[in-house]
Amino acid sequence: MLRNILSVGGLTLVSRVLGFLRDVLTAALLGAGPVADAFFVAFRLPNHFRALFAEGAFNSAFVPLFSAKLVQDGQAAAKRFAEEVMSLLLVVQLLFLAGILAVMPQFMTVFAPGFSDEPEKFRLAVLFTSITFPYLLFISLESLLAGVLNSMGRFAAAAAAPILLNLCLIAAMVLAAPLMPTVGHALSWGVFAAGLAQFLYLYWEAGRAGMGLRLSLPRFTPDVKRFLTVLGPAALGSGLTQINLFVDTLIASLLPTGAVSYLYYADRLNQLPLGVIGIAVGTVLLPEMARRIKGGDEPGAVESQNRAVELSLVLTLPAAAAFLVAGLPIVSVLFQHGAFGPTDAAQSAATLQAYALGLPAFVVIRSLVNGFYARHDTATPVRVALAATAVNVALKLALMGPLAQVGLAVATSVAAWVNAGLLAWLLTRRGLFRADARLLRNLPRMAAAALAMGGTLWLVQTQLSSWLTAHGLFERLGGLVLLGLSGLLVYALLAVALGLLRRSDIGRLRRRRKGA
């Protein structure tokens, strides 16, 4: 499981590094003005629905059922089930896409009402979203193919697919932008092309794995009905999660120009550890637990979940410490170029620090929720998400006035801790999860190592202030690299000294990777 997590995490890291290059270009060419706000809304909206239709509800319902079908009935039966689901998914997505495109201006009025006061920004948001929204169709089909491959133990292809998104967007800015009215137009078409490219790549990979799925007329077979039964509560739960993100976009559109962009840039940095660690752990853990539970190995499933939570925290706490202590130099060095000025950097950094408060909870949720999904319980996470959503929306409304977009990020972080706490409590109460002695022993050690790292970053940051604020880009990058390496070195040494990372485990993993 650890090997698969590192494989997925490594490929995700490549994607995120390319994503940073993309964001540096975006910040320099778009900045945080009206065109940027319009594009970021156009990019966020299909991704909200992507999390609802694809990564969130769909995977939590499809992967355990497909894994069980693969173990019990064989590959042919599992393939037939995947084809039945894909045919139904395609029809639903085409109808939904046609409906949204037909009412796009009204749709934008609901989800970004603040743009109505600025006609040009509103017009661009409608145009850009009309171009980007078909991305949802492609990425939903890609999610099904990724679930098939992950259930078969082939994690690399699905983890590599997002690399195509970043390559397409970089190419759009470099090659297509000079031919279009704005960079926002080029980026919107880049999103469309990326969705198509990702789908075609995974379809090809599925064919290589013996899962070349074919379309047929949708039929409500017993397997499909069972899938829809499990999908219903999961969709509601993912819908509640997306309400939090929709509220972010809606309220941010009511704030002064730039708020949407500040949230976007801060979230992009926050998504690096969340994607590399949280999504990698969750992606591998769900089929792992589903197989163990189906085979009657409940203790093994609980052990896997303990190690997933432990690994998530060991790797996430230093990232949270870095964002809290060194948020401003990170944002300013990476993004403060061209149209992205010092004020934009300061606002984005404050938003990043607010997101960092909830980063450990965001990552742990990915592991905890699989304790329910692997047992085909998609209803309990809905109730938890409902409570967290209520807290989130209430805090957003209370904090948007005094703290602007920073208040929205604070509310999101508090709600994440509420979500994680309730999930852990319910799993423990039902006897489905219990923190073992190793996890309980290591929790205070992780906190101590992260605090020491934060203190180191603060001290080194003061010594490198002239580098981090220099006019030359390479001097600033050099200062940021030295700052990051100093914090990483302190945390790594403490992690080994305190037993969080064992030399024997690292050596054994290295030997296995060489053998593979």
Image (cartoon, grey):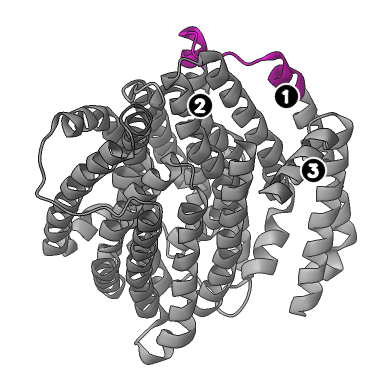
The extreme bottom residue here reads 179
Would you call the spot at circle 3 few (<14 residues within 10 Å), some (14-19), or many (20 or more)?
Answer: many
Identify the residue under disc 3.
454
Query: Which amino acid type corresponds to the residue marked 3 in the rendered image?
Result: Gly
Q: Determine the secondary structure under disc 3.
A: helix
Q: CA distance from mark 3 to mark 2?
A: 27 Å
Identify the residue under disc 1.
443
Residue 502 image-quadrant placement: top right
Q: CA distance from mark 1 to mark 3?
A: 17 Å
Identify the residue under disc 2.
368
Q: Determine the secondary structure under disc 2.
A: helix
- Magenta-highlighted stretch: main secondary structure? helix
At a point 30% along the width and 50% down the height, the residue shown is 49
At a point 51% along the width and 16% down the height, the residue shown is 297
Query: Which amino acid type corresponds to the residue marked 1 in the rendered image?
Result: Leu
Q: Is residue 65 left or right of residue 264?
A: left
Q: Determine the secondary structure under disc 1.
A: helix
* Mark before the other along the chain sequence, 3 or 2: 2
